[in-house]
Image: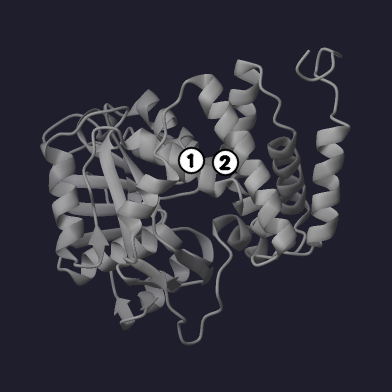
Amino acid sequence: MRYIIIGAGAVGGAIGGRLAGAGHEVVLVARGAQYTALRANGLRLVTPDGEHTYRLPTVEGPAGLGELRADDVLVLAVKTQDSEGALAAWGPVPVAGGGTAAERLPLVCAQNGVEGQRLALRRFRRVYGVCVWLPASYREPGVVSAAGAPLTGILFLGRYPHGTDDTVRGIAADLEKTTTFEAPVVPDVVRWQYAKLLTNLGNAIRALSGAADSAESERLRQRVWAEGESVLTAAGIPYASAAEEKARRGDKIALRPLPGTEPGGGSSWQSLSRGTGTIETDYLNGEIVLLGRLHGVPTPLNELLQRLANTFARERQPAGSLPSADLVRLADEAVFHPMPAADGREPGA
């Protein structure tokens, strides 16, 4: 199989680099400065086992490849807010032997949240979900760091919305041949993704206040998490427990200091630090806000984080520039003095 990594940033670059290092055929898809750097110098993957440079075919979009092959696997690794454009571009591309990518090729969504695969299923017949446990960062064009060891990551895979098949088992086998990924194939991948979503609710706190080890930030994170759990329970959505996650992860992905790199603060922090102008919070905290509104559960903390993160991204405010004490104060105000509902009623009325 040939792997076409649509979005060769942190997650996509780490997956593409590790697959290439194991001898698999890989094509990278990137834009702007990342595309220029990858074309000129290759992908530099910095890991605890050393620095690896992979000179791989790199394109800006489908036009750079022309007709796709029947053995191609499309890996969607862009941020969720960029999914629709990528899906619209790649879905109609013709495949050798007839048909289009949307009709014939597997699309693997290696993304945070759960919305990307929903969008994909509107266009693609064969969609596969991934629960991504892969600590990686991309802050310099052409360079991706992945600090996990002994494993780079654990990638739960399954057919979306549920089930397994020979295709996903083949993809998992290729990932595990790298010896740097564990790739469990599960029939309920969405259950693992919702558990990861709860963890990702704290991304905005780190992006806004930068205080990863602050006691007050940790208490806020627990409150945000509890709000998310209440929403998932009300919606009847199952998710893997923290105990299950801990048992599967064990000590397989311990973070190691990497030469020439600074510890990252998660994908949302990286978006603010690079000044991209967008952030994926609408599909993390915003997913909880949406479900809360659908099922009548107030979500003032997640609403606050969604609003603040979008403001910071839009105005290109620096990552970590909101003091954690100020963020906690705003959170308390949001809980005790909630904004009225759109219809003018008190929240929850």
Image point (65%, 67%), residue name:
213
Q: Callout 1: few (<14), some (14-19), or many (20+) C-alpha neighbours within 10 Å?
A: many
Q: Nearer the viewer, residue 333 or 34?
A: 333
Residue 318, quarter of the rendered image: bottom right
Disc 2 residue type (three-letter): Leu
| Residue 255, x across and y down, in percent | 43, 72
Give the quadrant of the C terminus.
Answer: top right
Please tell me the numbered disc located at residue 278.
Answer: none
Which residue matches tag 2? 284
- Amino acid carrying label 1: it is Gly
Q: Which residue occupies the foreground of this view, 93 or 159?
A: 159
Q: Earlier in the sequence, mark 1 or mark 2?
A: 1
Q: Would residue 71 appear left or right of 254 to someone viewing this image?
A: left
Q: Secondary structure at mark 2?
A: loop
Residue 346 is at least partly visible in this image: yes
Structural crowding at the residue carrying mark 2, measured as other residues with C-alpha within 10 Å and reported as few (<14), some (14–19) or many (≥20): many
Q: How is the image coloured?
A: one colour
Q: Are marks 1 and 2 in contact (CB under 8 Å)?
A: yes
On the image, the x and y values in percent for residue 140 come to 53, 73
Report which residue position mark 1 lands on: 113
Q: Residue at x 23, y 63 (%)?
A: 19
The CA span between labels 1 and 2 is 6 Å
Task: Give the vertical position of 347 relative to 150 (above or below).
Answer: above
Say above or below: 233 vs 157. above
Given residues 247 and 95, the one toward you in this image is 247
State the image quarter where residue 64 is shown. Answer: bottom left
